[in-house]
Image (tube, coloured by chain):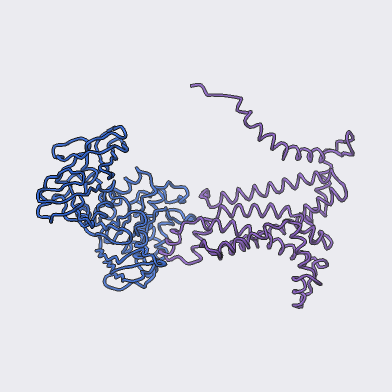
Amino acid sequence: MDKPWNNRAWFLVIPVFVLVAFSAIIPLMTVVNYSVQDIFGPGQAFWVGTEWFEKVLHDERLHDALVRQILFSLAVLAIEIPLGILVALSMPADKGWRTSLVLVLLALPLLIPWNVVGTIWQIFGRADIGLGGAAIRALGIDYNYTGNPRDAWLTVLVMDVWHWTSLVALLCYAGLRAIPPAYYQAAKIDGASRWAVFRHIELPKMRGVLIIAVLLRFMDSFMIYTEPFVLTGGGPGNATTFLSQYLTRMAVGQFDLGVAAAFSLIYFLIVLLFSYVFYTFITTVGTGDRS
Amino acid sequence: MTLRLDAITKTVGGAVHIDRVSLDLAPGSFNVLLGRTLAGKTTLLRLIAGLDRPTSGRILDDGRDVTGRGVAGRDVAMVYQQFINYPSFTVFENIASPLRRKGMDAVEIERRVKRTAAMLRIDGLLDRLPSQLSGGQQQRTAIARALVKEAGLLLLDEPLVNLDYKLREELREELRVLFAERRTVVVYATTEPAEALILGGNTGVLHEGRLLQFGPTLQVYGRPVDTDAGAIFSDPPMNFIDGILTDDGVALSDGTHLPLAAHERGLPAGPCRIGVRANHLGVVRRGDQSVAVPARVELAEISGSETFIHVVHNGVPLVAREEGIHTHPIGEIIPVYFDPARVFVFAPDGRLLAAPRSLPNRLKGVA
C-alpha cells in the first residue's frame, strides 16, 4: 500500500508557528541582530562580528555577577526544596477546613506581585521602622541590609524563601496526596520506619513534582530581578547585583545595546544548558538506566 | 496459626461498618470473603491484619488474644488491589525487603527470593524496577513479596481486580496451586462469585458488614442461607419471584403453577419467594424445564459463548443465561423456562426454606 503523503498537513501547524514566531523567534532574532552589529539608528548599523561577545566574556564584573548568581540559585534550591518537602509532609491530609486554611495561607505569598514583595521586605527589614529589622536590632544584632553586604544577601535570600517555598510545598503536597493509602498500609505491615516510608515511598513518588519544582525554582531564581532591585538596588556596592540586574544596567543604564544583546544570548544559553543538563541527569539517574 | 474472630464489631462515627463477625480460620485453609463493593471486606481485612482496632470483640491467634496488638506485632502479609511495590527498589530488592527487615543473612535471602520469584515466574525480571513492569508482573512481584515472608496469615484484597481479563484468569489458576501447599491462613476478598468457586476452600458471604454465612464454598453455593447470600453468590444475581406455597406446589403471583418438587415436600404452606439462578432460567425449552412464565424482553447481552437475556415478568426483572447467541427484539413477549427441581425456596423474610437436592454438577461457568 502506498504511504499516504499529504503536504497540506503543514497548514495545520501554521497557527502555532506564527504564534511562536511572534512570541519567541522574532524577539530572539532581534537580539541576535543587535549582538553582532553596532546599531546607531535605522540604516546605521555596522557589522562587528564577535566583538561584543569577546567584550562580555572578559568583563570582570560580569564574572562576579555570574558567580553570585550561581551561589544564590544553589542556596535557594538548597533551602527551598527540603523546606518545601518538610512543609508538605507536615500539612494535614484530610479534606477538612484546616487543610483549606493551610492551603490558602500557603498560596498567599504566591499571589503577591514581585515588586510588592520587594517593597514589603524593604520596609519590613528597615532597622528604624521595620518590624523585622527593628526586632533583630532589639536582639542586639547589628543588622543593616543597606550597609552590610552579608545582611543584604541574607535578606534577599530570606525574601525569596518566603516568597517561593510555598510553590515547592504545594507541588510536593499534590505529589504526596497522589500516593494511594495502600502504600502506607503495606509499609506498616512491613514494619517500615517513618524514615524508610519517606525514603522509599514518598520521595520516589514525589520525583516527578520535585523535578518540576527544582527546574522552576532554578530558572526563576537564576533570572531574579525585581525583588532585589526594589529591596537593595543591587547594593551595597554590587553585593546583590545578579545577572539580570547587571544586564539591565548595561542595556538601559549605559545603553550598551550590543554588549547587552550578546550577554542576553549567553544568559539564555546558560539557563537552557543548566536546565537541560539537570533534567537529563535527574530523569536518567534512578530509572534503571544505570547499567 | 489458627485465627479466631469473636464477635468483631467496627463502628466509625456511629455508622456500623462491621457487625458482630465471628469466624474460625484453620491453619492452611483458603478462605474467600465474598461481598459486593462496600460490604466491609476491606474493613474486615484491616481488622484481621491489625491495621485497625475493632470497636468490640476479640481476635485470637492460636488462642492468644491479639486484639490490641498493632500490625507490627502480628505475623501477617498483605496484597492489595493496587500494585504496591517500593518504586525505587528492583524486583529483587522488593521481594527481599521483608526478609531484610528480619535481619536474615544475604545467602539465605538470595535463595528465598529466587525460589519465590521462580514460583511466580518473575525470575527473569529481578533487576527491573516496578515502573518497567507490566501490571501483571507488578502484581506478581507484590504477591512474591507477601509469600516470601512466610507469614502465618496472608490477606489478599481483590488482588486481581486491576488486571485485564486474560491475566486475571492466568494468575487465578496459579494462585490456587501456590496456596494449596501452604500452612498459611489465607483470606482472599473478592466481589466475584466465579473467583470464589474457582479458588475453592471456604467462602464467607459478607453483606452490609454482617457475615451471612461461612462454610465450604460449594456448600455455601448450594445452600445460601437467605436471599441476600443467594444474590451475592450468583452472577448475575439470583432471580426472585414471589409465590404462595401450597400442598401441591407453588402458585406464583401471576397465577403460574409450579408442581411440587422433591426438595419442597413438607414445607409449611404460606407465602414464599422462589429463587432461580440465571443459568437455570432459559429462553429455549429443555427436557426438564417444565414451567414457563411469560416475560417482556428488555435487553440481550451477548458475550459470544453465551447470552444474558434481561426480561421483566409480572413487574419483576429477571435474567436468563443461554448458551450461544440469542437475539430477541426488545419488547417482545417470550416464555422463560425453568425446572421446578432447580428452584430455591425462601421464606418471605428471606430465610432459606429449601434448596435443590444435589449440588450443581456443572460448575464451570455456572456462576
Q: Is residue B192 above or below residue A6?
A: below
Q: Is residue B111 visible?
A: no
Q: B145 left or right of B213?
A: right
A241, B244: nearer the viewer: B244
Q: What chain is the purple one?
A: A
Q: Is residue B145 visible?
A: yes
Residue A141, position as x, y percentages in the image = 76, 75
Q: Quadrant of residue A153?
A: bottom right
Task: Report how many numbered discs are placed on residues in the image.
Answer: 0
Q: Quadrant of residue B149?
A: bottom left
The residue shown at (14%, 49%) is B358
Q: B335 left or right of A253?
A: left
Residue A218, position as x, y percentages in the image = 67, 54
B32, B206: nearer the viewer: B206
Q: B126 left or right of B258?
A: right
> From the image, which quarter does the N terminus of chain B lie in?
bottom left
The residue shown at (66%, 35%) is A16
Given the current orientation, which residue lies at the most extreme top position? A2
Residue B72, position as x, y percentages in the image = 40, 68
Q: Colour of chain B?
A: blue
B238, B213: nearer the viewer: B238
Residue B198, position as x, y percentages in the image = 26, 49
The residue shown at (84%, 52%) is A249
Q: Quadrant of residue A60?
A: bottom right
Q: Is residue A117 above or below residue B120?
A: below
